[in-house]
Image: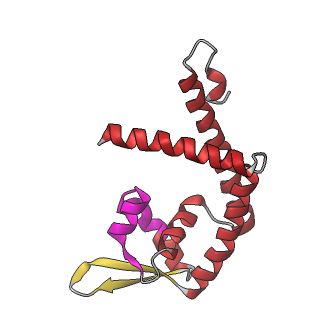
Amino acid sequence: MDLEARAHSNHPEALRLWLRMLTCTQLIEKKVRTGLRDEFSTTLPRFDLLAQLEREPQGMKMTELSRRMMVTSGNITPVTDQLVKEGLIERSSVDGDRRAWLIRLTPAGRALFKKMAKRHEAWIVQAFDTLSSKELQSLHGLLGRVKQHSATETS
């Protein structure tokens, strides 16, 4: 039974919507995880790490990488070790800070990520292809309002 099925008509509509959004997110994420595994023999965390590095061609420190991925350095160290071993990223020391490492994509890593990103985009577009352009824009705008409201409540 998914999260959405647990809600009943006597629950507030906002709760039912929240559960539907979670269910949709889980279903789309499952498709992405399966696609990454089947087509590229990789995982979503590896894809996410490569995506962060692709946005910073000069590379970034491990501490910044873990902050952006919202995980501890200890969580990404084994992933980075494996990606270094596979030649997809490189790790170099940082001048003046012997405890810090700079991580960046290799040309092979950049090329592979480009292929993965193209497929990732196609999976996401396919997940929403039942909606018209106008419906997508409307949903995006409505969720933007929810995001803005939630962000101002927590600050």
In the picture as drawn, the residue positioned furthest to the top comes out as 10
- The one nearer the camera, 147 or 19, is 147
Q: In screen coordinates, is 112 left or right of 12?
A: right
Residue 130 in the image: x percent, y percent?
78, 46
Q: In screen coordinates, is 80 left or right of 1?
A: left
Tell me the residue at 35%/68% (across/down).
64
- The one nearer the camera, 7 or 131, is 131
Tell me the residue at 56%/16% (across/down).
11
Was residue 145 drawn as part of the magenta stretch in this picture? no
Quadrant containing the N terminus in the rendered view: top right
Q: In screen coordinates, is 60 left or right of 116?
A: left
Residue 30 in the image: x percent, y percent?
67, 48
Quadrant containing the C terminus in the rendered view: top left
Way the structure is coloured: secondary structure
Tell me the residue at 55%/83% (across/down).
87
Q: Quadrant of residue 93?
A: bottom left
Residue stretch rendered in magenta on the structure: 59-79
Tell me the residue at 70%/45% (across/down).
135
Magenta segment, prevailing SS (helix, strand or loop): helix
Residue 146 in the image: x percent, y percent?
48, 39
Counting labels gives 0
Residue 7 in the image: x percent, y percent?
61, 20
Can you say whether 10 is above or below 44 in the image?
above
In the picture as drawn, the residue positioned furthest to the left comes out as 96
Q: Quadrant of residue 91?
A: bottom left
Can you say whether 9 is above or below 33 in the image?
above
